[in-house]
Image (cartoon, helix red, strand yellow):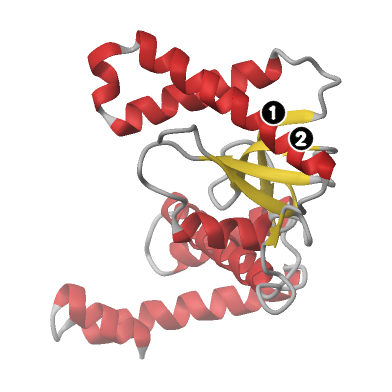
Amino acid sequence: LVGGMNGVIFNGPRGFAQGAKSGAIGGAVSGAFAPLLPAADAWSVGRTVTSAMIDGIASVAQGGKFGRGIVNSFQNMAFRYAFDSLSAFTKSFGEGTELVAIPETPEMQAIHAQLQVLADVAAANIDATCGWVCKAPMVRGRLIHSEFAELIKALGPNSGFSTEVSYFDRKLSSYGFLLSSRADVVFGPRDRPIAVYDLKTGVSGIRLKQLIGYRMNLPLGTPFGIIKPTGD
């Protein structure tokens, strides 16, 4: 029936029979090869390749091209994988996952004060050199972030700080991963942070989207704070 409706959409009323026939053939071929697939929740190279081959054969059986069936298969699987990944890690987005404030202990107050000085120096350095370019808040913000990161790296490997660390689903993630949250500064072990900080510049604060991302991606119980250059 779905194949018939597709035939009507693309070929008019006369296309119903042809579309229904193609849909039936494709469904029969896919069904015949379905037992070859691993469990539905087992994402692997083998499952991806096998499914693509089956869809290619089904495409040929419907009168189409083998390559087109493979391309469509990869597109569908990519979307499903992204959706499954998103669904999996949002299950933990509930009670007990709220962001934790950084404790006001003498140690953490000293850490915050150190980062505040570095943020102020970074902003002063950029404002003194970038000229008219910094009239654009986004450009100024990026330059300050880069300068801030370089100042922290200059403290050396034993400082306890790491910069631009990405997290996804409570674990370390590759840099730039689409659904990850990237912390500007991490204090302590990267996989078990003592505290995580986000640097903000200008008049705007942290966005709701970022807060939700941190809440969903940081290891549970990770203290979170915001650093902002004085005067911004």
Query: Where is residue 230 shown, x and y percent of the image?
Result: 48, 33
Q: Mark 1: which secondary structure?
A: helix
- Check disc 2 and report its element: helix, strand or loop: helix
Camera-side residue of 49 and 167: 167
Q: Position of residue 142 (x, y in %)?
A: 43, 27
| Residue at the image position 50 percent from the left and 61 percent from the top | 79
Point out the image quarter for the N terminus. bottom left
Q: Is residue 53 visible?
A: no
Indicate whether 22 appears above or below 52.
below
Residue 173: percent from the left, percent from the top? 70, 44
* Residue at the image point whose x is 51% and y is 54% from the top: 210
- At label 1, the amino acid type is Gln
The residue labelled by disc 2 is 110
Marks 1 and 2: CB-CB under 8 Å?
yes
Residue 156 in view: yes
The residue singled out by tag 1 in the image is 114
Q: Report which quarter residue 164 is drawn in.
A: top right
- Cα–Cα gap, marks 1 and 2: 6 Å
* In this picture, residue 148 sits left or right of residue 47: left
Q: Residue at x 74, y 41 (%)?
A: 109
**Displayed quadrant of residue 97:** bottom right
User: 9 left or right of 64?
Assistant: left
> Looking at the image, which residue is at 68% across and 75% down?
91
Q: Amino acid at mark 2?
A: Ala
Q: Quadrant of residue 219?
A: bottom right
Task: Give the left or right position of residue 145, taking residue 65 as reference.
Answer: right
